[in-house]
Image: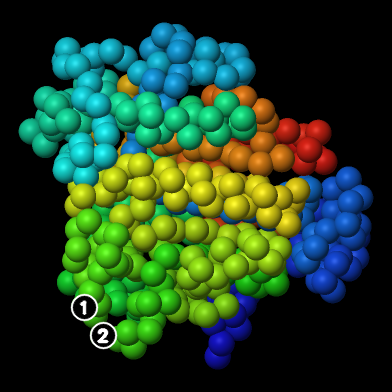
Amino acid sequence: MSSHAHAWALLSSLGILVAACGGGGGTSTGAGGHPGAGGAGGAGGAACTGVCPTSKVQRLVVIIQENHTFDNHFGRYCTAPAGSAPTCNDGPACCERGPDTEPGGAAPVTLDDAANGGYSPNHTQACELDEIDGGAMDRFVSSSCGSASNFAYARTSIVKPYWDLAAQYALADRYFQPIAGASSSNDMYLARAGYVFTDNAYEPKGSATAECTGLALKSFTEPTIGDLLNAAAVPWAFYAEGYQDAVALGGSCPTSAPADCAAGVPAYPCVFDPGDVPFEYYASLVGDPTTMRDLADFEAAVAAGSLPAVSYVKLVGYKSEHPAAGIKLSAGVKAVTGLVQEILAGPQKDEVLVLVVYDEGGGYFDHVAPPPASAVDGKAYGTRLPFLALGPFARKNWVSHVTMEHSSVVRFIEWNWLAGKTGQLGGRDTEVNGLGSLLDPAQTGVPVTD
């Protein structure tokens, strides 16, 4: 059985029904011959390409970076006093500046390329919960696993390109890490909208080079947003830098590293890391060549105007901004802003919403307390993360104060491409806010659900 057929059988057995495309009302056929809903043009009557979405957002690109908090990157962009909880939305005066000292009195360090490449905070769940201290946010330095280096603001000259994007488009200042702890556990919320495991407990069984990491291998069978999209014939793909090189090894482990990777090792951060791809943990999707692609395929699709409805993009580790291992913060910023420029100058620039999100906060300080633990899975939230919404559908010079997390992205995908029905995975997609506060209804054609 093909992976797509397997996914459909799985979803049907669970009683999960999805429509072939978003929108309300009767069915029709959109451009490309895919069935649509609410008229071939989707929202607002404009012609759509492929499966017709609920709104005018025809393409979504989610760029996933690593291990930094909102304060890390935007604590010196925002200018409202810490703790002032501004209710306005117009630019940096409407989000809180990071404090000049942390609660214990320590001054911040400057997070430049050397500092980023030389140290990674402890970001296990136990440590992060200790540092968050029930919302007091006062033990990032003083905890037994804390450090003075955990209280850091990125050098302005390095992150200024992100500030420029925030000033041009929309920034969320209440987007939280969905679970306290390390990257893989948080990535899973982008696929499942719910808890799967804690920290980096496993590598995905069956994925290229997963056996080379030394971690236990695990696969899961529950439906993901990828399975829902496949069942509804909505095209999507996960584009990971270095993936094709990993596949080409044919089961062997890497033996060399790219020349521009400072760590110089045939392992993370120099090569593809399967644990960064949440869909690779699922038996219905692992290694599927129609949805698991390389970054080069993404860049080719951008240039050709052939992006699928939903794209996830993961840069190789040394461009991900992850701390330690000689990873330069500036390299990640350059790579991300370069991709954004390509997308927003490409043939599909008028159809696309670009999201820049970080998997987790990496154990760095942030001054805003997380929301209470989720009522769905009982898991505690972690720190705030940088989150940008970019392109023609994003509000301009806007700061959203709506509480969101990775499951909010899943919720938007369900709403926009799966018949307007949210909560189809039965996880946090049933309770979280959507992305509507970041988007301009005059551009989306219809108000996007919060």
Secondary element under disc 2, as helix, strand or loop, is loop
Residue 52 image offset from top left, x and y in percent:
80, 60
Circles 1, 2 touching at the beta carbon (< 8 Å): yes
Query: Which amino acid lies under the numbered mark 1 shown in the image of this protein?
Result: Thr
Front residue (pair 69, 423):
69
Q: Is residue 267 above or below residue 341?
A: below
Q: Residue at x 21, y 78 (%)?
A: 255
Q: Which mark is residue 252?
A: 2
Front residue (pair 230, 69):
69
Q: Which mark is residue 255?
A: 1
In the image: residue 412, left or right of residue 401: right
In the image: residue 184, left or right of residue 164: left
Q: Residue at x 51, y 68 (%)?
A: 296
Q: Quadrant of the C terminus?
A: top right
Q: Quadrant of residue 210?
A: bottom left
* Mark 1 surroundings: few (<14), some (14-19) or many (≥20) residues within 10 A: few
Residue 164 image offset from top left, x and y in percent:
53, 30
Q: Is residue 132 above or below residue 178?
A: above
Residue 297 image offset from top left, x and y in percent:
55, 70
Front residue (pair 180, 266):
266
Q: Is residue 410 above or below residue 255?
A: above
Q: Quadrant of residue 135?
A: top left
Q: Residue at x 26, y 39 (%)?
A: 113
* Mark 2 surroundings: few (<14), some (14-19) or many (≥20) residues within 10 A: few
Q: How was this image coloured? A: rainbow
